[in-house]
Image: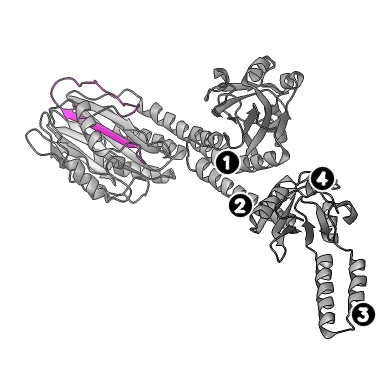
Amino acid sequence: MNALDPFPTAPPDPFLTSAALRALSEAVRDAAGRAPQADRVVDELRLGRRLLDETPAGIGILDQRLRYLYVNDALAKANGLPVEEHLGRPMPEVIPGSGPSAEVAREVLRTGRPQVVVFDGRPPADPVDVPRYWLGAFQRLDADDGEVLGVAAIVMEVTDGIRQNETLRRAQDRLELLAETATRVGGTLDAAQACRALTDLLVPRFADYAAVDVVDPEGTPRAPATPAPVWLRRMAVTAAPSTHGPLPAPVTRGGEVIFHQASSSMARVLTEHEPVVLNRPDDDAVRLMAPTRQRLERYRAMGLHSVAYLPLMHAGEPIGAVIVGRRGDSPEFAPADVEVLAQVTARAATGIGHALRYTHEHETTLEMQRAFLATPQRTGPGVEIASRYLPAGRGAEVGGDWFDTVTLPGGRTLLVVGDVMGHGVRAAAAMSEYRSLIRTLALQGLAPDRLLAEADRTAHALDLDRVATCVLALLDPGAGHAVLATAGHVPPLLARPDSVPELADLPVGPPLGTGTGGYGSRCLPMPQGSLLLLYTDGLVERRGRDIDAGLTALAATPVTPGHPLPHVLDLVLGGLAPVGSEDDVTLLAARLGHGPASHATAADLGNRPPP
């Protein structure tokens, strides 16, 4: 064999068989007269051959044309062919698909540098079409004179280890995905944002299109127990960019109410609580399973070849479903895909369920407050008022703030600002009870301190489950003064003409509903043009900051009594109220003058106007 000729044409000489080698070694031992050195050489030769023959690692020795010269039983078994069918034949001919390992062997022959690689393949006789993996070490064989004899390959199957590592990797990836789902979807109490976070997580990682439909109070408020037509709210939809063109506009809108017929996949998944998968359905199946029978053309225009519906279950009840679709060159949904998608949607359902409940309660509470605060405000003569109500920012529960004005005999006007402890629907309901109670007592002509005492006693007797802070200001323009009393509320801001604004110094009583009583009042002079600002603690209180700092900032606000009241409110809000406050902010400003009352403003229930 010539080292300069990489493609010798002579047939290869396979290694001696084990039996022939054993017979030859015995003959050598006899011919040597059992010389000790000869015995040692023979023993080492036979030991080396036994090692090659009996090791569990597959061993093959090939010539320069990659023809097998030697194959042990382990390698023959791994290849699924007898030893005899290997000898003298090239590796690619014996094992179709062995191109990568053959390339490694050629590289080792060319460079002389050993290589250790992992390669996959499938033995010809393997009945299961599943890849298997081997670890191979390739070493060039050189004669003492430098002639290249061939290459030796030692391989061991590592399929189980790689599959175990792959299983662990997939499990780790799945745990990270579920953690990401919980963080992104569960990190907001805005239902639309939570649903959008889920569709953005799914596209394009798992699908080309994703949408979330949920039960809706204006459509179908509860999923039916048996298949029935349903109206669901499409909360979010996301589509991946594609060379096949954008999705049609009618199917990419969020916020619309979608009708699903009784035979649709959506109705089925809501009643069976199990995923529904449609891989390349025909037109008849699409007509049956689509939201409406008329949407076949729209579905075909989307180019989706496979769709999966997965239920969103929260507290044992279906709250909606996720629709994911694939189009173009994306593969169909395999069982493993559906398993992962089901775990993701199950984890997301908790966050979406909480967000839907919060959003419903938040909107209900806000509507209650708006209904109460939208009542036209009336005052006695000589009192001008302006008011503003800012609900808490998104992600914060609406509280129980309220304000009121009551016209009393003798040209007097009672101003009321209160704040029920807590947030949500129950706080708003309690707010309505306190508001009605104080209005009723005010019409009895009670002084502010007596009014608070009676309200406290009555609320305690009625066992209202929430206490409330409150401040009252009885304005008398004719007398030029106001009588103020407080039940655990923040002090009003008083600005008289030609004087520095100051916080009213009032006797502090306990919140209403405690039943402890003990309220006092104070009469403060308020000449014509004086301004009084009542507010709730949402204006001055911040997390991580002492409320005294907020009160000091309010007192330092350059309030000018002569300015229009809406301008005064804008000035105060612009300097103190943060965007997205964690608590409601309520303000009621009043200015004393002569003549009939001015009714220029009422509760502003929208967003804060620009300062």
Amino acid type indicated by mark 2: Gln
Amino acid type indicated by mark 4: Glu
Amino acid type indicated by mark 3: Asp
Which coloring applies here? Answer: one colour
Mark 3 to mark 2: distance in Å?
Answer: 64 Å
Q: Which residue is mark 1?
A: 348
From the viewer's perspective, is 439 left or right of 565?
A: right
Mark 2 to mark 1: distance in Å?
Answer: 18 Å
Residue 202 place in picture, x, y as percent: 58, 36
Mark 1 to mark 4: distance in Å?
Answer: 53 Å
Judging from the image, what secondary structure is the residue with disc 2 in?
helix
Q: Which residue is mark 2?
A: 172
Give the mark nearer the N terminus: 1 vs 4: 4
Give the mark nearer the N terminus: 2 vs 1: 2
Judging from the image, what secondary structure is the residue with disc 3 in?
helix
Give the mark nearer the N terminus: 3 vs 2: 3
Mark 4 to mark 2: distance in Å?
Answer: 40 Å
Judging from the image, what secondary structure is the residue with disc 1 in?
helix
Residue 163 place in picture, x, y as percent: 71, 53
Q: From the image, which quarter does the C terminus lie in? A: top left
Q: Which region of the structure is painted magenta?
A: 582-608
Residue 30, which numbered label? 3
Q: Which residue is mark 4?
A: 93
Give the mark nearer the N terminus: 4 vs 3: 3
Give the mark nearer the N terminus: 4 vs 2: 4
Label 4: how many Cα within 10 Å (few below 14, some 14–19, many 20+): few
Label 1: how many Cα within 10 Å (few below 14, some 14–19, many 20+): many
Residue 294 place in picture, x, y as percent: 67, 14
Judge whether residue 367 is colored magenta. no
Amino acid type indicated by mark 1: Ala
Residue 351 place in picture, x, y as percent: 54, 41
Front of the two marks 3 and 2: 3
